[in-house]
Image (spheres, rainbow, N blue to C red):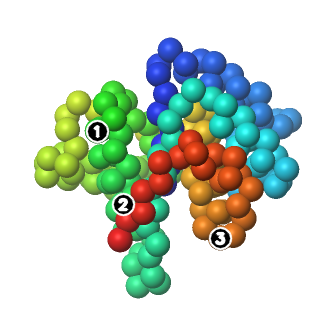
């Protein structure tokens, strides 16, 4: 999982830049759907934006369900955002059922005092919030790097704080 952290004063400029990277009538930027050349262009553009990038990685075996590994990464990512003083964290909406599971995780880590009450968590559809596309690109570049496709990650490597989890 990944997050991009930026000053709220930069939101509009970053949104406009990300929107300018869309091709044709595509409703959003999505790393997996882009060609290798476009991925490099997207990563290069993100590397110039005024934001911090964090990626959490959990290399899990087949015995650990995907959703469990995702929750481990999300919990740590939210903790890191909270420690950075982020006021609002927006999570990409997946479906009402899966968003509810994320909400239960947020409530649990708040009760466990891993996450303070200072950070507001919201969910948005990726087609509605271009800022989510930056996080998608950082996550995509990182996971593709782990699979041996290093181009996008190389452009972003010095701008990503990588956190590997057990």
How far apart in space, not on screen, are marks 2 and 1 (Cα)? 18 Å
Say whether residue 83 is visible. yes
Q: Which residue is mark 1?
A: 83
How far apart in space, not on screen, are marks 3 and 2 (Cα)? 21 Å
| Relative height, residue 17 to residue 134 (above, below) | above
| Relative height, residue 105 to residue 83 (above, below) | below
For the residue labelled by badge 3, is the local secondary structure a helix, a strand or a loop? Answer: loop
Q: Nearer the viewer, mark 3 or mark 2?
A: 3
In the picture, the disc for residue 95 is: none
For the residue labelled by badge 2, is the local secondary structure a helix, a strand or a loop? Answer: helix
Question: Residue 100, position in %: x, y?
Answer: 35, 51
Residue 122 appears left or right of 4: left
Residue 103 appears left or right of 60: left
Q: Nearer the viewer, residue 61 or 55?
A: 55
**Label 1: how many Cα within 10 Å (few below 14, some 14–19, many 20+):** few
Location of residue 50 by image quarter: top right
Q: Nearer the viewer, residue 15 or 145?
A: 145
Question: Residue 81, position in %: x, y?
Answer: 35, 40
Q: Nearer the viewer, mark 2 or mark 1?
A: 1
Say whether residue 26 is visible. no
Q: Which residue is mark 3?
A: 147
What residue sits 28% from the left and 54% below the top? Answer: 105
**Label 3: how many Cα within 10 Å (few below 14, some 14–19, many 20+):** few
For the residue labelled by badge 1, is the local secondary structure a helix, a strand or a loop? Answer: helix
What residue sits 44% from the left and 36% below the top? Answer: 90
In the picture, the disc for residue 71 is: 2
| Relative height, residue 146 to residue 17 (above, below) | below
What residue sits 32% from the left and 54% below the top? Answer: 75
**Quadrant containing the C terminus in the rendered view:** bottom left
**Label 2: how many Cα within 10 Å (few below 14, some 14–19, many 20+):** some
């Amino acid at each position: 999982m990944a997050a991009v952290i930026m000053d709220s004063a930069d939101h509009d400029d970053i949104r406009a830049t990300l929107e300018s990277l869309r091709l044709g009538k595509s409703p959003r930027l999505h790393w997996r759907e882009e060609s290798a050349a476009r991925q490099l262009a997207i990563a290069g553009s993100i590397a110039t934006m005024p934001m911090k990038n964090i990626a959490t990685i959990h290399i899990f075996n087949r015995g650990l369900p995907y959703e469990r590994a995702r929750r481990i990464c999300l919990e740590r990512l939210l903790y890191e955002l909270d420690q950075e003083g982020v006021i609002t964290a927006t999570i990409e909406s997946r479906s009402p059922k899966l968003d509810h599971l994320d909400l239960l995780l947020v409530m649990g880590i708040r009760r466990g005092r891993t996450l303070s009450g200072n950070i507001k968590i919201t969910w948005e559809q990726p087609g509605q919030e271009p800022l989510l596309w930056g996080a998608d690109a950082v996550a995509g570049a990182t996971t593709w790097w782990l699979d041996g496709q290093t181009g996008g990650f190389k452009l972003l490597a010095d701008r990503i704080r990588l956190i590997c989890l057990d």
